[in-house]
Image (cartoon, helix red, strand yellow):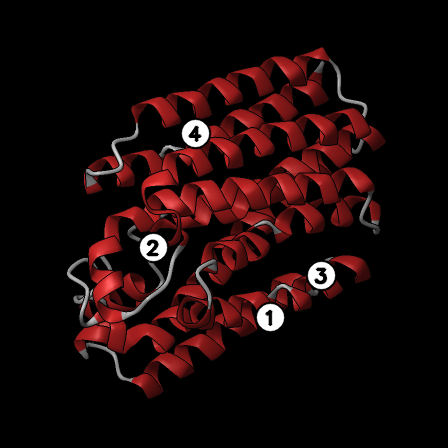
Amino acid sequence: MMPLSWRPYILLMRLDRPIGTWLLLLPGWWSILMAATITQTSITTILFYMGLFAAGSIIMRGAGCVINDLWDRDFDRQVERTKARPLASGEIRVKSALIFLTLLLGAGLAILLTFNQTTIVLGFLSIFPVILYPLAKRITWYPQAVLGLTFNFGALMGAASILDTVPVFAWVLYIGGFFWTLGYDTIYAQQDIADDALIGVKSTALKFGERVSQYIAAFYTMTILCFGVAAILAEAGFVFYIGLSAAASHLLWQYRTWDKQNPNSSLKIFRSNRDFGLIIALSAIAEYLF
């Protein structure tokens, strides 16, 4: 049983909402598995790196949430969905949040330093879009693009952890992940369009307006095309393409099922992207094994 004093910090890290951790983690797992298949890396090494990426994703997603909430605490108080967050409600003070953020970043650094030099450099570079994302909501209609650049760094770091370089397939996987994030986070932002318009927060959901469904279709199409090209560059076999077809079917299901007028539907479809990511990961595992 956790002490009650821990609860606000668990909520601050969004540990009660693990979907964000999955979305940050999965591109790294895809890339590790694809690189490991090329090099026939041992299963123990694969599991070791996947475990490090899992721990790092939990910590760094938490750090990102703290940074976001420090930037947005005044906005969060004005949005029904976010007004109870620990910083917005005053349950955690700014000074305490900064100390907690320092501890999280220190833990993340300790994990990062176990990797090779290329992965370490990429890890440091990934901090900049994390810091800039909350600012993007104030100055551009495309904060989802900044999130896409941030959340898919694992696609570069995963391959680098195995190869100590970033191969072309990893860059294409990163671009595909970028479009994937544009899609799912636009769907997520659809929940808050009324509040965001009122308080002046920008998003692709507001920018696209009535055409949002067409943009989602375009983003998801680009996602599958990029993943297909990445698979070709990684010399993947038919097993992976079977899984990629299943993943494409899942995105089609999302598109056809989503009711953009219903916030509950937006949240459900957003969360289902964990399943999409797991289908890609299982496809890469099957490719490695067979």
* Left or right: 203 in relation to 48: left
Q: What residue type is labelled 2?
A: Leu
The quadrant the C terminus occupies is top right
- Return the residue at label 3: 122
Please rate how many residues cluster around mark 1, counting C-alpha atoms within 10 Å: few if below 14, some from 14 to 19, many from 20: few
Label 3 SS: helix
Please rate how many residues cluster around mark 2, counting C-alpha atoms within 10 Å: few if below 14, some from 14 to 19, many from 20: some
Label 1 SS: helix
Which one is in front in this view, the residue at disc 1 or the one at disc 2?
1
* Left or right: 65 in relation to 88: right
Q: How far apart are marks 3 and 2 (CA)?
A: 25 Å
Tell me residue 94's x, y (percent): 32, 84
Which one is in front in this view, the residue at disc 1 or the one at disc 3?
1
Q: How far apart are marks 4 and 3 (CA)?
A: 27 Å
* Left or right: 33 in relation to 38: left
Q: Could one spot residue 199 in this view of the protein? A: yes
Which one is in front in this view, the residue at disc 3 or the one at disc 2?
3
Q: How far apart are marks 1 and 3 (CA)?
A: 11 Å
Of mark 1 and mark 3, the one earlier in the sequence is 3
Nearer the observer, 96 or 154:
154
Q: Which label was assigned to residue 15?
A: 2
Q: Which label was assigned to residue 128?
A: 1
Nearer the observer, 205 or 55:
205
Q: Are marks 4 and 3 in contact (CB under 8 Å)?
A: no
Please rate how many residues cluster around mark 3, counting C-alpha atoms within 10 Å: few if below 14, some from 14 to 19, many from 20: some
